[in-house]
Image: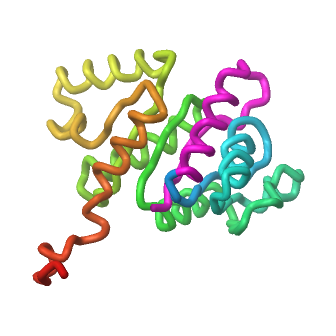
Amino acid sequence: MFVCVFLASSQKIDAKYLTLAEEVGAEIARRGHTLVSGGARVSCMGAVARAARAGGGRTIGVIPQALVDIEVSDEDSDEIVVTTDMRERKGVMDARSDAFLVLPGGIGTLEELFEIWTARTLGLHDKPLVVLDPWGLYAPLRQLVDNLHEAGFTRPNVFDAISWATTVEEAFQHLEKRTRHLVPSPEEIGESTP
């Protein structure tokens, strides 16, 4: 499974967020998945990729040329895709991914979360979306969406389009449970089992 991880690139955050990113990267490798990320070597973005590679996992970084030009590109990635801008970057990350995992981050992470969440709510894709939030950073966001829903601004399936987790294990259980349809069983394709 190709797991796209959206997370922080800020270098002013508490070390616990870096540790969480490392745990996620290690778990991606341990479970035999491939990491798709924003392709930078800084902060949590770099931490998740380094941990995935340290565990034997494959990493794909997708980064706009403007960030390559200021030398933040993760040159150790197994594959680097350089895009013309941020919009193209998100499109490539979406196309290359089977599932999305959102960790604590800033407004860029929120933008990525909302784009994937909106598309799933509209039925434009059925890839799982999981938010890993051990410290409740996104609690106000959840409350805001609850309020929007109560006021009639969201579709009823807005909550079905996303899962929330507080541990790495729980996050991967959600991701893997919801991606089992990607590989049809013999029964689903009309074949008998050997």
Tell me the residue at 29%/51% (across/down).
178
* The C terminus, quarter of image: bottom left
**Quick check: 79 above or below 193?**
above
Tell me the residue at 74%/48% (across/down).
50
**Quick check: 177 above or below 167?**
below
Q: Quadrant of residue 107?
A: top right
As for residue 44 lying within the magenta part, the answer is no
Q: Choose between 159 and 54: the one closer to the eye.
A: 54
Q: Choose between 153 and 116: the one closer to the eye.
A: 116
Q: Choose between 37 and 157: the one closer to the eye.
A: 37
Residue 127 is situated, as x and y percent measured from the top left of the image, at 34, 56
Is residue 136 visible to us here? Answer: yes
Residue 38 is situated, as x and y percent measured from the top left of the image, at 65, 52
- Horizontal arrangement in the rendering, residue 75 relative to residue 108 (left or right): right
Tell me the residue at 56%/50% (across/down).
30
* The N terminus, quarter of image: bottom left
Residue 73 is situated, as x and y percent measured from the top left of the image, at 81, 55
Is residue 62 visible to us here? Answer: no
- In magenta, the rendered stretch is 1-30
As for residue 25 lying within the magenta part, the answer is yes
